[in-house]
């Protein structure tokens, strides 16, 4: 029997696992991290690598280790230069962030706790949980942390549904089968946020002169994806006093700077546009038609754009992560959910005794930062401190 089972081994799952290990709340042999991938952080590594993200959006104190200054001391020990950190908030390079995470996994022997599998059901037994996987495994654990994410729920606009089904030249950038090496220019990148900015810059280097960025709003420049006040009591105290979860959801939606990008990416895109390395079109695509052969015509209010490929950087569907199997568990265990479908949990992040949540599932308690690395740290701290 495991003391702790963490379902999902992404940023969120690995953060709670590392916090439990580093705070001596569990030994690697009594911890199980269960995830369908071969190794930790697979979605993170793939998604950030695919768009060639050079620096994180978050500052140097946001990483997976319990000590906030661990990333800085790791960098100093390696004698690396200051150029591993960008700007006034010292945003770490993706390279150093990933190396530091890997170092943490080695230091805590976290990979000893890794089990490959996709959880498809959870049962309550006398004084423990039983977790079932799609491939027929069954694991017993005293505590469970659900660390699922919306990353598997890709959003593609309705007008592209049939194009996407028919063609390997029309896909969401985070689709597991996405292959940007075989795109056929001209290419449209659809989306107005930070992912579309990174992607457009990367594709412009691969397909010079062949990339058009189509966005439905002017560039929105923000350093962070929510006001930094959300990191501490400044905004969190009032949020926690809201007893109506519908209002909490409303506050979260309004607090997120969706579809935004950092100033240096904005400058880079502008430079690319001025040098005619990319085209930028403002407007919402309302429909698309495929002509003979490969050409697709995208119809906007003021103009039409002809392309051979479309890559969506349009984010994720907002619904609660987990899908059908979690719906059944909610019903079976009679777990509380707000009208938006997300868990109502106690301040220890327990959905019911010994069943914890972290990441997007914890956002009605943690607030707008829940899905980010800072949210993972705060949630992990809350769970560990409650033990
Ligand atoms: C391109 C990009 C850049 C970002 N940059 C930043 C940044 O700079 N700073 C920041 O704070 N945030 C950033 N984020 C946001 C956020 O930190 C990341 O999305 C992060 O990867 C989310 O971690 P996660 O653990 O919730 O999700 P994931 O990394 O997707 O991990 C969830 C894991 O759970 C697994 N899983 C799902 N269902 C099951 C199941 N039933 N059984 C077992 N396992 C399951 C999945 O397969 C997956 O491996 C960024 C996001 C993206 C997409």
Image (cartoon, rainbow, N blue to C red):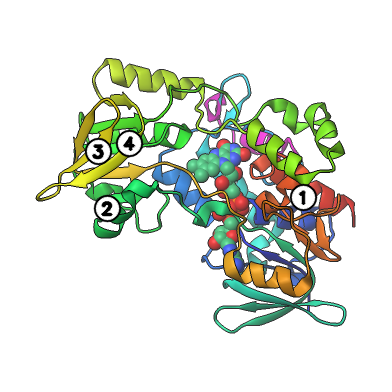
In the image as oriented, which residue stretches furthest toward the left?
A: 292
Label 1 – label 3 distance at C-alpha: 45 Å
Q: Earlier in the sequence, mark 1 or mark 2?
A: 2
Q: Nearer the viewer, mark 1 or mark 2?
A: 2
On residue 163, which mark appears?
A: 2
Label 4 – label 3 distance at C-alpha: 6 Å
Please check the rendered image and state whether residue 238 is part of the magenta-colored stretch, yes or no. Answer: no
Q: Which residues are magenta?
A: 68-85
In the image as oriented, which residue stretches furthest toward the bottom?
A: 136
Q: Quadrant of residue 100?
A: top right
Quadrant containing the N terminus is bottom right
On residue 298, which mark appears?
A: 3
Between 110 and 246, the one lying in front of the other is: 246
Compared across the picture, whether 320 is left or right of 173 comes to right
Q: Earlier in the sequence, mark 4 or mark 2?
A: 2
Label 4 – label 1 distance at C-alpha: 41 Å
Residue 71 visible here: yes
Give me the residue at 64% from left, 32% from top: 254
Label 1 – label 2 distance at C-alpha: 42 Å
Compared across the picture, whether 183 is left or right of 201 comes to left
Give me the residue at 26% from left, 48% from top: 181
Give me the residue at 57% from left, 20% from top: 87
Label 1: element kind: helix
Mark 1 neighbour density, 10 Å: few (under 14) some (14–19) many (20 or more) = many
For mark 1, what is the residue? 380
Note whether 18 is above or below 65 in the view shown: below
On residue 285, which mark appears?
A: 4
Question: In the rendering, at what x and y percent does residue 189 appear?
Answer: 33, 37
Q: Earlier in the sequence, mark 4 or mark 3?
A: 4
Label 3 – label 2 distance at C-alpha: 11 Å
Q: Earlier in the sequence, mark 1 or mark 3?
A: 3
């Amino acid at each position: 029997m495991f003391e702790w089972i963490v379902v999902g081994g992404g940023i969120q799952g690995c953060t709670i696992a590392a916090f439990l290990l580093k705070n001596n709340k569990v030994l690697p042999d009594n911890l199980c991290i269960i995830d369908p991938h071969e190794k930790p952080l697979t979605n993170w590594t793939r998604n950030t690598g695919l768009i060639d993200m050079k620096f994180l959006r978050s500052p140097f104190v946001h990483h997976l280790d319990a000590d906030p200054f661990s990333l800085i001391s790791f960098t100093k020990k390696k004698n690396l230069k200051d150029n591993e950190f960008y700007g006034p908030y010292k945003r770490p390079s993706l390279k150093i962030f990933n190396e530091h995470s890997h170092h943490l996994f080695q230091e805590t022997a976290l990979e000893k706790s890794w089990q490959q599998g996709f959880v498809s059901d959870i049962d309550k037994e006398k004084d423990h949980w039983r977790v079932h996987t799609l491939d027929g495994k069954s694991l017993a654990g005293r505590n469970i942390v659900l660390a699922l994410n919306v990353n598997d729920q890709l959003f593609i606009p309705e007008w592209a549904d049939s194009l996407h089904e028919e063609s390997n030249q029309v896909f969401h950038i985070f689709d597991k089968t996405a292959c940007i090496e075989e795109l056929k220019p001209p290419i449209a990148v659809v989306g107005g946020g930070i992912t579309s900015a990174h992607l457009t810059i990367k594709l412009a280097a691969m397909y010079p002169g062949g990339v058009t960025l189509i966005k439905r709003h002017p560039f929105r420049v923000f350093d962070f994806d929510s006001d930094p006040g959300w990191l501490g009591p400044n905004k969190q105290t009032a949020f926690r006093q809201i007893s109506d979860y519908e209002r909490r959801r409303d506050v979260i939606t309004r607090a997120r700077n969706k579809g935004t990008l950092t100033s240096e990416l904005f400058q880079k895109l502008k430079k690319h546009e001025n040098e005619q390395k990319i085209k930028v079109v403002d407007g919402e695509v309302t429909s698309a038609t495929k002509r003979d052969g490969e050409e697709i015509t995208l119809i906007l209010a003021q103009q039409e754009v002809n392309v051979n490929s479309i890559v969506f950087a349009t984010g994720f569907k907002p619904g609660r992560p987990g899908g059908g199997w979690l719906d059944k568990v909610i019903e079976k265990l009679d777990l509380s959910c707000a009208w938006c479908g997300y868990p109502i949990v106690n301040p220890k992040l327990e959905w019911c005794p010994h069943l914890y949540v972290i990441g997007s599932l914890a956002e009605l308690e943690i607030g707008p930062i829940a899905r980010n690395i800072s949210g993972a740290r705060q949630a992990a701290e809350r769970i560990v401190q409650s033990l």
